[in-house]
Image (tube, rainbow, N blue to C red):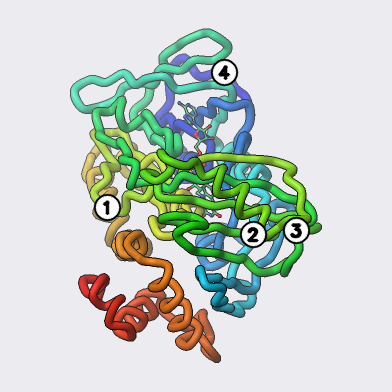
Amino acid sequence: MDAMPKDAGYDAVVVGAGPAGSMAASALAAEGFSVLMLEKHREAGVPLCCAEAVSLRSLRLFLEPDPSWVAARINGASLASPDGTVVEVAWPGVGVVLERKLFDRFLAQRAAQAGAEVLVNAEAVGLVIEGDMASGVSVEKAGLRETIACRLVIGADGIESLVGAWAGLDTRLGPRQLHSCAQYLMAGVEGPADRVRFWVGGELAPGGYAWAFPKGQGRANVGLGIEGGRAEKVKPAVYLERFAEKHFPKARVIETMAGGTPAMGRDHPMVRGNVLLAGDAARLTDSLSGAGIAVAMASGDLAGRLGAEYLRSGDRGPIDDYPGRWWSGPWKDLKYHHRVRDVFLKLSDGEMDRIARLLARILEGRDPSRLNPIDVAKTVITSDPGILALARHLL
Ligand SMILES: Cc1cc2nc3c(=O)[nH]c(=O)nc-3n(C[C@H](O)[C@H](O)[C@H](O)COP(=O)(O)OP(=O)(O)OC[C@H]3O[C@@H](n4cnc5c(N)ncnc54)[C@H](O)[C@@H]3O)c2cc1C
């Protein structure tokens, strides 16, 4: 996965070998363009901070699950509200928990097999900008700096992205526009091996939630995210320690992780000139859940395909259209999820308990795969006058 950059430059440089970058590089290489994907770490997928769950429906837009990078198959979920009300949902085949270090490596290999060059231990440190167009990427590798010429740049450099800022875009995240997270990989975790579990509550995880996602052999990702602004007072690691002691007293921590997920939801810049952002770099995640793996894959793929159209024709129309194409496509409901998060941030524990009881009633005996989440949200809102007062604008 390591090659020397071509002196003549590349059609496209992709910064970051996460799911967004590898999908973009695959799409560009599959169209026959020369692509260099840069990764600042020594391999794709490491280090990692992720709970690794993805729905099969969204994964299958691109790939069939492969046992080599699937840690557990998921057949349902439960949600516990502050007073202990538990909503159980049986949903055979709803998703998987990935072994993401292997998954990210698989996606990078897939890009390489499609023809992309992958340069690891290589950090992008700036863009060469002429007018509003990038003509190259500055890269540091082994203490040496060089500039790689290109006609297109895709910034897939994750939540700490700088590519957008180098292109002149404002990609800053305010504290309320992110989830601040801490996670343990634990061994000896008791509980169902094929269910993802969630907990909500103001004391437990203010402005967020806690989770336990099984990874097979008694292992699980046990973590939580809180609203970023609240993390300034008490760090998520403190909440996590309390949560793990209470719910998993017999389990042992074998890895710790800390990170953040963007919760922008709308109006984030995605393109400037010939520089496109994808995945966390474009702040494209599900604001409500913090999920971003499938969104990163989808936005990376779209950015790569539109970038290929631009490289073929020289017409900037397709890349100028990238935000419009994204927000009118299959992921347009993310905007609604962001508005639901705004309401979620205002809920008291009592309101969360009432919502849990309503959800339990709504879901009882129903096939969850046939329900539209937005319709379920609307039914909850109209079923309780207090919730209606908070969330009337979501109807
Ligand atoms: C605690 C936690 C739990 C999560 N759980 C889930 C979950 O269960 N399900 C889900 O769907 N999502 C989850 N997410 C979100 C998910 O991890 C991200 O949305 C996803 O990884 C985004 O993919 P990406 O390709 O955009 O960025 P990343 O996966 O972050 O990849 C970016 C890559 O760019 C590289 N890079 C950065 N800067 C440079 C540079 N200058 N030069 C070269 N390389 C660079 C990085 O090293 C990295 O490899 C979670 C996030 C956190 C923090």
Front in this rendered view, residue 315 or 352: 352
Give amino acid for label 3. Val
The image quadrant that residue 120 belongs to is top right
User: Left or right: where does residue 182 sit relative to residue 248?
Assistant: left
- Please give the residue where the numbered disc 2 appears in the rendered image: 213
- Please give the residue where the numbered disc 4 appears in the rendered image: 4
Are circles 2 and 1 on residues that touch, CB within 8 Å? no
SS at badge 4: loop
Query: Residue at 67% across / 60% down in the picture?
Result: 247
SS at badge 3: loop
SS at badge 2: strand
How packed mark 2 is, by other alpha carbons closer than 10 Å (few <14, some 14-19, many 20 or more), is many
The image quadrant that residue 146 belongs to is top left
Mark 3 vs mark 1, foreground winner is 3
Mark 2 vs mark 1, foreground winner is 2
- Distance from label 4 to label 3 (Cα)? 45 Å
User: Left or right: where does residue 261 sit relative to residue 218?
Assistant: left
- Distance from label 3 to label 1 (Cα)? 37 Å
The numbered mark, 3 or 2, whose residue comes first in the sequence reads 3
Look at the image and tell me in which quarter the C terminus lies: bottom left
Residue 93 makes an appearance in the image: yes
Q: Is residue 34 above or below residue 92?
A: above
The numbered mark, 4 or 3, whose residue comes first in the sequence reads 4
Are circles 2 and 4 on residues that touch, CB within 8 Å? no
- Distance from label 2 to label 1 (Cα)? 28 Å
- Distance from label 1 to label 4 (Cα)? 38 Å
Q: Which mark, by number, is residue 189? A: 3
